[in-house]
Image (cartoon, rainbow, N blue to C red):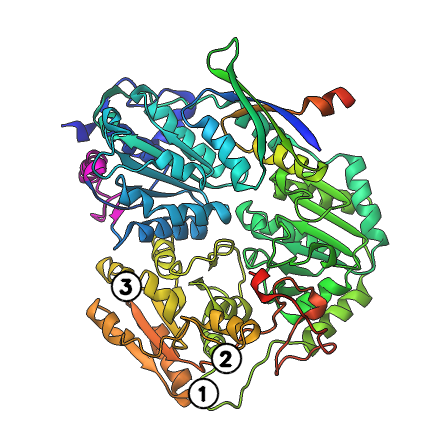
Amino acid sequence: MNHTLSILLQNEAGALVRVAGLFAARGYNIDTLTVAATLDPAVSRLTLSLQCDDIALTQILQQTRKLVDVLQVAHPATALAA
Amino acid sequence: MSGILFVNAQPLKNELETHCHALAGQPMSGADVIVQVFADEGVNVLFGYSGGAILPVYDAVFRYNAMHLKDNGDESMPLIVPANEQGAGFMAAGYARASGNVGVAVVTSGPGATNMVTPVRDSMADSIPLVVICGQVASSSIGSDAFQEAPISNIMGACAKHVFLVTDASQLEATLRTAFTLARSGRPGPVVVDVPKDVQNAALSFDGKGELALAGYRSRLHAVEQAVLSDAECAAFFSALMRARRPLIYAGGGVVAASAAPALRAFVDTFGLPVTTTLMGLGAFDTTDPLALHMLGMHGTAYANYAVEDCDFVFTLGARFDDRVAGVPHLFAPRAKFIAQLDIDPAEIGKVKPVQWHHVGPLARALERLTAYGRTHDLRPSLDAWRAQVAQLKATHAMNYDRDSALIQPYAVLQAINRHTDGRAIISTGVGQHQMWAAQYFDFRAPRHWLTSGSMGTMGFGLPAAIGAQFAHRDKLVIDIDGDASIRMNIGELETVTTYALPVKVVVLNNVGDGMVRQWQKLFFKGRFAASDKSLHKKDFVLAAQADGFAWAQRLERKEELEATIAAFLAFEGPAFLEVMIDPDAGVYPMVGPGASYAQMITGDFIASRHAPISQETAASEMF
């Protein structure tokens, strides 16, 4: 099913590439991707959507949290449902 | 003289905690900052190859060593030069694996850095802490296709735990210090710092403290490191364990990385569970112990794999159900009603196989907590019947081979060496049949004695890893068990052994080709030996070793000379090279084929099987 993730990451050189690279390396296809500044210029918000099942979603959330530049990974749908 | 600015690391450590660094406020070049942070981090050996974009750092190392000779006249931070940067990376990795400290490699830009990709990926896959400094072209030239330029932050970003490209010289010192923290914290791994040449030459002021904030990483790390098992979690664990009749511990490389072997020993001494380890976990539990089942998996012992088939409870410690252990995850430990998993990495929980109980946190503390809880509540599972069954499995399905063959059997060679070393030597390997035979036939009494490329399976790992390990333990016996194909990959490092007068022992089990590939071609490709036969290759390994300065280099071809030759080889005080012409048809058994379950294990002609293997009809092209 379709999932949307909201990722806060440090605005470092190469940070976007690392998130995109992780998804590519682990075989997840990104459907949409938006990167925008936040009120804190050192932090960017990356919003992406992808198709995957719940088990794959859990794994991709965990793997994304291993990226050193990533501050926070949220899955708004889970938060709303909870 | 800027060399005078350096201060040795050891006296500083205490000072750092209470006072500011003795060199705080001193002017230093970026290169001097790098070397001083190395010293502060306790680095006592560097591995690397020079080149234009790293010259300022090499000069700083030279000056540091000139100013800091040890009492015996040795350099305090020797820079070990390989034949190829890949060798330097595997030396740093071998040093890290054998010592538990961060291994450090320093290479130049472009090809120097790209030659380092394989050791970095290898270390990532096996969770080995490295810090790799790569020179980079000047900041103003980045992106201009400059001489020896490569996009290292892109390339390494996909392979390493983390990569920094230092674009702001004022951040260099904090970045370097952070790289060490990242490499050794949580699940360890390699960290690459790409340093443009102008940053190395920048005029800086040394702070002597400070790291990058990395708020996200640090908060997640803090949560994991502070995690404590609650009483309820301990109760749930023991409730399942006390109901189990046949519980088994499945221990991986995480036990070694976490220095949790003593905690595992105490747990086993208290509750009496048998232990099987992964390839990476060898040494986490004394393999000579009656409760040790040695290695499980694709080429695990038959008795370990049968115990996995029989067990009704699995306690997974720092292991990840990878495809060489759980080729078919839902058929792994099919009778286990309860699987518990301890790991430092939250992403490993449930990644491959669902578990009934888990805890994410430091392994040693979690094991100690469980042991204390079980003791306090007097929870001792009665495992006499299961332990007897395990002993029976070990006796009935013991490792064995063709002892009557006129040809030298590789297993006999390793057993003969093992009789001398008794599980106390450091053993490194290449990748292939010889690696699996070494894993199966050597004893390991303690962690960090077994250095092998587990996850990546990198041929050519063994020789440079042995060199690195010898630098970590100058007085220990270090043996590289290699294959004729694997050693060719980094054979230039034979010269490195003699250049530094390292007493490394090199064994080449020569079966004239890529033995493991041939084994698969026999099994799955009707014996068509595409590109795996090396009978036309001309290399005389003994002459090659002699040419590289090995005073002791011999070829063993006659079975009756085996014992005496090995005794002389191991007794030689300096570097020694032994080529053994082995039975080219010797196979690795047992074998659980790719995509097969343990019930389909083939044990070969000399190891007793419990039942005729279930025939397996699969498309060979789909397997790896």
Residue B315 rendering spot, x and y as whole percentages: 71, 51
Mark 1 to mark 3 CA distance (whole Å): 28 Å
Residue at 22% from the left image edge and 36% from the top image edge: B53
Residue B588 rendering spot, x and y as whole percentages: 54, 73
Residue type at mark 2 is Ala
Residue at 26% from the left image edge and 58% from the top image edge: B496
Q: Which mark is residue B235?
A: none
Residue B504 in sight in this render: no
- Mark 3 or mark 2, earlier in chain: 3
Name the residue tied to disc 3. Answer: B494
Residue at 25% from the left image edge and 55% from the top image edge: B83
Residue type at mark 1 is Leu
Instruction: Give the residues in magenta.
Output: B52-80
SS under mark 3: helix
Residue B379 rendering spot, x and y as whole percentages: 82, 49
Q: Nearer the viewer, residue B68 or B71?
A: B68
Image height of B203 relative to A60, above or below? above
Which of the chains bears the disc numbered 1?
A: B
Q: Nearer the viewer, residue B359 or B337?
A: B337
Residue type at mark 3 is Leu
Q: Are marks 1 and 2 in contact (CB under 8 Å)?
A: yes
Q: Which residue is most to the right?
A: B243
Mark 1 to mark 2 CA distance (whole Å): 10 Å
Name the residue tied to disc 2. Answer: B586
